[in-house]
Amino acid sequence: MDFKTLSAPKEGLAAVAADALLLVVTAAAPTEALPGPLGAALKAAVDAGDLTLKAGQQLYLHRVAGVKAARVAVAVAADASVAAWRKALAAGVALLKAGGTRHLAVALAGAEPTDAHAEALVAVVADQTYLYRHTKPSAPAASALAKVSLVADKSAALDGGLRRGQAIAAGQTLARELANRPGNHCTPTHLAAEAKGLAKAHGLKVEVLERKDVEKLGMGAFLAVAQASHQPLKFIVLRWNGAAKSAAPVVLVGKGITFDTGGVSLKPAPEMDEMKFDMGGAAGVLGTLRAVAELRAKVNLVGLIPSCENLPSGRSVKPGDVVTSMSGQTIEILNTDAEGRLILCDALTYAERFKPAAVVDIATLTGACVIALGHHRTGLYASTDALAGELLSAGERGGDLAWRMPLDAEYDEALKSSFADMGNVGPRAGGSITAAKFLQRYAGAYDWAHLDIAGTAWKSGAAKGGTGRPVPLLTHFLLARAG
Ligand code: BES
Ligand code: MN
Ligand code: ZN
């Protein structure tokens, strides 16, 4: 897809040469802002009761007299904010992406778009034109859409936004695609191969640790989860060196459970297929590395992905088993379905060797987080207010929102065990928080944050599929750190 900025011809939007024109108007005073044939058509539609100037409304018009573009869609936004623009675009692009539109021109009536509007436009188009084909080659032909132009007066200023949008969208699409691949295709070995391919294409360093390496490191918690599966575990290490060698890196740790049955603490059958998405954190790390490398961001970044399956078998770890983590702390595995924290804790200890500026782990960690926050905001935990603030505002900039959750010491008591330094679960109440408290016990050596993406990494139901979140949040966080 080709994204460009376009200065409107002096005759106005009606003269823009494109197959389709998407006009986003704000609910307040749009008709005055639009002179000429488009303004007349809009006024006529409103007068006829075919369009209400309320956020969320839209109208498709074919061959409007005096307008060069054969197809016109009008989408009403609540205001000129990026969030409202994003929503209106989603509705408008849906009306125009099918059919004969190859070149789509998009304009915001009555306000100048910013680089953030440009970035959001790319995100919406990428989202709406993505098609899963990996195990469904018969999927319908991709949309004919090949070129999208953002019409604006000062179009040069928006090129940066389009460029950033394209890198983020490519990373987000990668994360989404990997998450969508079924567990029998997207194995730990497959993720490792994808990481190697990514490294080769984008100038990253990559190293894949095997079982024997992980044994040597003493990652007893990770090994316990992986021990039942016939698929070999992988511990993927990726590096992007965009800053001076002396600059401490940010480390991203992504949960890479390529299928989570729960193990001996078996999950119920309904919706268990969705546990192929349990590598969403790993996918987010890969997607973010892609975006950061494509933008050649001046930051040092390490991606760590512990990856394995969580299965029941005669070799499975059992409830009550005690394992020794790489940190030396012992863990009583009371529930084998709380496996994410077990593979992450060893990766958090491994992260110490990079003397990181900050470590952020990303995981589809708890069903409890879905109960707490639903599917809109990611759960954010952070050891410092400054890091929390950085991540929250990065989410705002990327349209990929998070919400801060507490880490009070009182929650830690739930992890007490009679037979080990800690159990791996607490009671049902506050389950997302106790999972974070568990991880915090391994993250004392650096500034640390944890993103619980259980509610945001994928969608269920008719539109089932990965979202590629939190690639926009993480990329904005890193771009801000890169200065
Ligand atoms: N991958 C799941 C978390 C999950 C469940 C994400 C459902 C999205 C939807 C994780 O490994 C898990 O099973 N967590 C348990 C923890 C519990 C045993 C303390 C959970 O949330 O039920
Ligand atoms: Mn589980
Ligand atoms: Zn899991």
Image (spheres, rainbow, N blue to C red):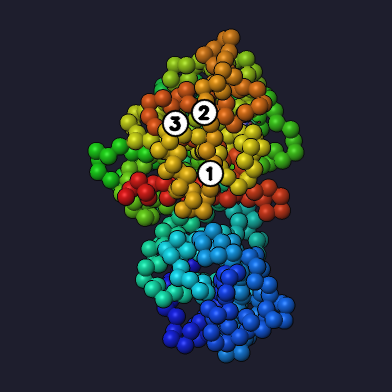
Mark 3: which secondary structure? loop
Q: Which residue is mark 2?
A: 407
Please name the amino acid that badge 1 sits on.
Ala
Q: Which residue is mark 3?
A: 383
Q: Nearer the viewer, residue 367 or 292?
A: 367
Please name the amino acid that badge 2 sits on.
Leu
Say whether marks 2 and 3 touch (CB < 8 Å): yes
Q: Earlier in the sequence, mark 2 or mark 1?
A: 1
Which image quarter: residue 216? top left
Q: Earlier in the sequence, mark 1 or mark 3?
A: 3
Dot 3 alpha-carbon crowd within 10 angstroms: few under 14, some 14 to 19, many 20 or more: some
Q: Where is residue 193? Give x, y as percent.
A: 47, 44
Please name the amino acid that badge 3 sits on.
Ser
Q: Where is residue 436? Give x, y as percent.
A: 53, 29
Q: Nearer the viewer, residue 330 or 472?
A: 472
Q: Which residue is mark 1?
A: 402
